[in-house]
């Protein structure tokens, strides 16, 4: 399951990269609600979705979803 720290990393990186939830969702091929759910910790994304998000945000899996 994604932790609170990982949720904050995703949200802050999304904002720093200039993405709205909607624009990131479109870029990775999911609904805005999926991004909302990931950021709230209510949805555990697949590895492929994690990779797509990382690619759009120019981060590695470890940087965005890894444990601290």
Image (spheres, grey):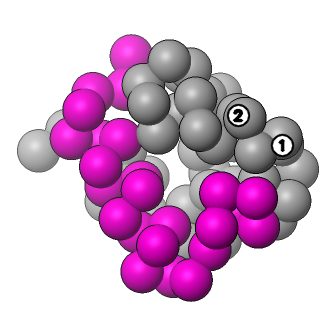
- Coordinates of residue 45 in the picture (x, y in percent): 61, 28
The residue that appears at 42% across and 25% down in the rendered structure is 41
How packed mark 1 is, by other alpha carbons closer than 10 Å (few <14, some 14-19, many 20 or more), is few
Tell whether 64 sits left or right of 42.
left
Query: Does the magenta portion include 5?
Result: yes
Q: Looking at the rendering, which quadrant does residue 9 occupy?
A: bottom left
Can residue 32 be seen by looking at this rendering?
A: yes
Q: In the displayed structure, would residue 43 be above or below residue 68?
A: above
Residue 29: image location, x then y, percent: 88, 50
Q: Is residue 11 magenta?
A: yes
SS at badge 2: helix
**x, y percentage for residue 32?**
76, 45
| Chain part drawn in magenta | 1-24
- The quadrant the C terminus occupies is top left
Q: Are marks 2 and 1 in contact (CB under 8 Å)?
A: yes
Quadrant assignment for the N terminus: top left
Check residue 34 in the rendering and tell me which mark sits there, or answer none: 2
Element type at mark 1: loop
Residue 30 bears which disc, if any?
1
Foreground: 67 or 10? Answer: 10
């Amino acid at each position: 399951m994604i932790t609170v720290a990982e949720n904050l990393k995703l949200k802050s990186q999304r904002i720093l990269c200039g993405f709205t939830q909607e624009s990131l969702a479109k870029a990775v091929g999911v609904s805005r609600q999926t991004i909302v759910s990931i950021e709230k910790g209510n949805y555990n994304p697949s590895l492929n979705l994690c990779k797509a998000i990382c690619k759009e945000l120019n981060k590695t899996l470890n940087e965005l979803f890894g444990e601290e």
